[in-house]
Amino acid sequence: MNRFFHIKALKSVVRRQALIFTALFLLAQFCVFSAHAATEEDQVKAVFLYNLVNFVNWPENALNQCDSFIITVVGNRRFADLVGEAVKDEFKANLKLEVQYMEDLDKAQYNTCCGMIFIDQKYQESWLKHKDSFIDKPILIVGESLNFIEQGGMVNLLKKGNRIQIEIGMQQSEYVGISYSAKLLRLARLVDQQ
């Protein structure tokens, strides 16, 4: 009888360990899938930022003093690296595309050769704090959060289901002399900034 309970207890322990192992395995698979999906979304956004450079027109004199066209990524170093891969060896007119990462918007306002700033959604509060510093500068301000255009941004890459919705705020863009190609405007949703 004692041996019977020992075997039954042992089977119970083995079952419990098997269930725990299975649960951990499934959790690990889910985490890998989620990380892969997030990376895929970021890769799409990185390539979109590169393509955006080709469908936006900056004022003629905006980058005259520059040797390169700088895309600043605020708040997400991993995404900055992906954008860097997307624009490697690429040019806007005769300016080499370069990517720089910044932890915050404080220093970005002083970079005169910056043509575009991408603001990670976690840094929306920082944008609200610093947006007045950019109001007169011909820098394309791109974000990825709700109400970004209404808060003074110019282009918003908003996730809608499994797609990226492009939103454009024409008023602020026109104010600093930035315009968009007709192809981009057909794809985008124009958002009123007033």
Image (cartoon, helix red, strand yellow):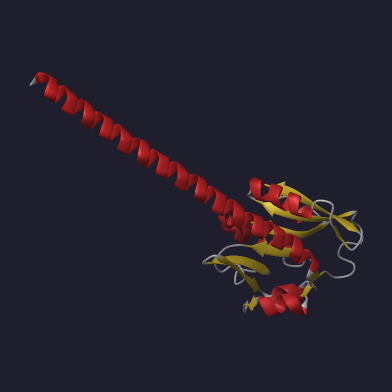
Q: Is residue 99 left or right of residue 33?
A: right
Camera-side residue of 120 and 78: 78
Q: Residue at x 36, y 40 (%)?
A: 22
Against 38, is 194 above or below?
below
- Corner quadrant of residue 191: bottom right
> For the C terminus, which image quadrant?
bottom right
Does 81 appear above or below 50? above
Residue drawn at 78 percent across, 64 percent down: 53
Judge from the rendering whether residue 61 lies leftward or rightward of residue 100; answer left or right: right
Against 179, is 46 above or below?
above
Residue 28 x, y percent position in the rendering: 45, 41
Q: Residue furthest top?
A: 2
Q: Nearer the viewer, residue 12 or 123?
A: 12
* 155 on left or right of 12: right
Residue 163 lies in what quarter of the image?
A: bottom right
Q: Position of residue 66 (x, y in %)?
A: 89, 56
Numbered-mark total: 0
Q: Quadrant of the N terminus?
A: top left
Q: Residue at x 92, y 62 (%)?
A: 64
Q: Is residue 180 visible?
A: yes
- Measured as percent of width and height from the top left, residue 130 is found at 66, 58
Q: Taking the image as drawn, is residue 139 in sight?
A: no
Residue 79, position in %: x, y? 66, 50
